[in-house]
Image (spheres, rainbow, N blue to C red):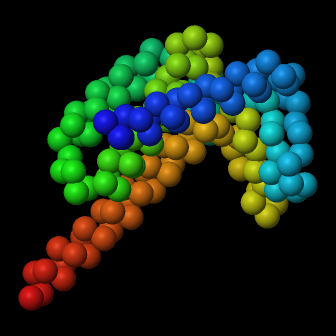
Amino acid sequence: MFYYMIALAIIIFDQLTKWIVVKEMELGESIPVIDNFLYITSHRNRGAAWGILPGQMWFFYVITIIVVIGLIVYIRKINKADKWLGVALGLMLGGAIGNFIDRVFRQEVVDFVNTYIFTYDFPIFNVADSALAVGVGIMFILTLFEGKQKKESTKE
């Protein structure tokens, strides 16, 4: 149940922040938070990450439904000892649903976190994207440690 609560918290925070951006900012408006590094910029994305596959909403609907079902099945099957895996899956579930809500009700995803890494203007993203990235990152780290543990156990 805890992992679903993580997903719900992500969905609520994601939708709340997007609602504030849509309500309080003009499209394209940018507010500096840390000059030359972090801005809140009102942006819309009709595609996937980095704007790829713009306008392919039915594709995103199908893929997202498959991913959400897969994540729910996976959460239900994990061992209670695999807490970090559950956290990762909860973050990914919340992120997937957060952006899915935008696609269904707005036909686009509201993005607003605009960062500059050195001189590179990183693609604008949102809370759901962040949750997805952190969840995938945790799973990647868990996979590395699992592989290392298996390798060490075969040496003994």
The N terminus appears in which quarter of the rendering? top left
Instruction: Give how far across and how far down residue 11 sits, in percent.
Output: 52, 29
Residue at 62% x, 19% y is 108
Give the quadrant of residue 49.
Answer: top right
The C terminus appears in which quarter of the rendering? bottom left
Instruction: Give how far across and how far down residue 73 sits, in percent.
Output: 22, 33
Count the marks. 0
Instruction: Give how far across and how far down residue 134 sits, in percent.
Output: 50, 51
Q: Is residue 92 visible in this depiction of the protein?
A: no
Q: Is residue 115 above or below residue 23?
A: below
Q: Is residue 69 above or below residue 132?
A: above
| Relative horizontal placement of residue 81, taking residue 153 as reference (left or right) | right
Residue at 75% x, 60% y is 117
Q: Is residue 144 above or below residue 86?
A: below
| Relative horizontal placement of residue 3, taking residue 82 as reference (left or right) | right
| Relative horizontal placement of residue 42, taking residue 106 as reference (left or right) | right
Instruction: Give how far across and how far down residue 22 sits, in percent.
Output: 76, 21
